[in-house]
Amino acid sequence: MSDNLIYLFVAFLISWLVMAAYLWSIGRQVRNLRDEVEALARQEWNQDAPAAAPSPRGRAESSHA
């Protein structure tokens, strides 16, 4: 009977290790995707914005005045 409990504990441990590895992998992919989206947004902002364009905050404040 105690041998069966050891197998149960090992299976439980392995399942948690697999789950942790999966979550770590997903977290890494999300971080890489976030970095890529930020880089694309910066690239788009630099291409679309003219040299003397006001900041987005300045535009929002002037529209309320």
Image (tube, rainbow, N blue to C red):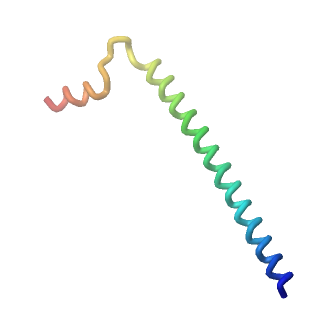
User: Measured from the top left, where is residue 28 in percent x and y?
Assistant: 63, 44
- Horizontal side of residue 8 vs 61, given as left or right: right
Report the residue that reaches farthest toward the top. 51
Q: Residue at x 61, y 38 (%)?
A: 32
- Count of number-bearing discs: 0
- Horizontal side of residue 23 vs 50, given as left or right: right
* Front-lying residue, 63 or 33: 33
Report the residue that reaches farthest toward the bottom. 1
- On screen, residue 43 above or below 14: above
Report the quarter where the C terminus lies.
Answer: top left
Q: Residue at x 31, y 23 (%)?
A: 55
Quadrant location of residue 9? bottom right
- On screen, residue 51 above or below 59: above
- Horizontal side of residue 54 vs 23, given as left or right: left
User: Measured from the top left, where is residue 47 in percent x and y?
Assistant: 47, 18
User: Measured from the top left, where is residue 62 in percent x and y?
Assistant: 19, 26
Q: Residue at x 84, y 88 (%)?
A: 1
Report the residue that reaches farthest toward the front. 2
Q: Residue at x 54, y 38 (%)?
A: 34
* Front-lying residue, 18 or 54: 18
- On screen, residue 19 above or below 63: below
* Front-lying residue, 22 or 54: 22
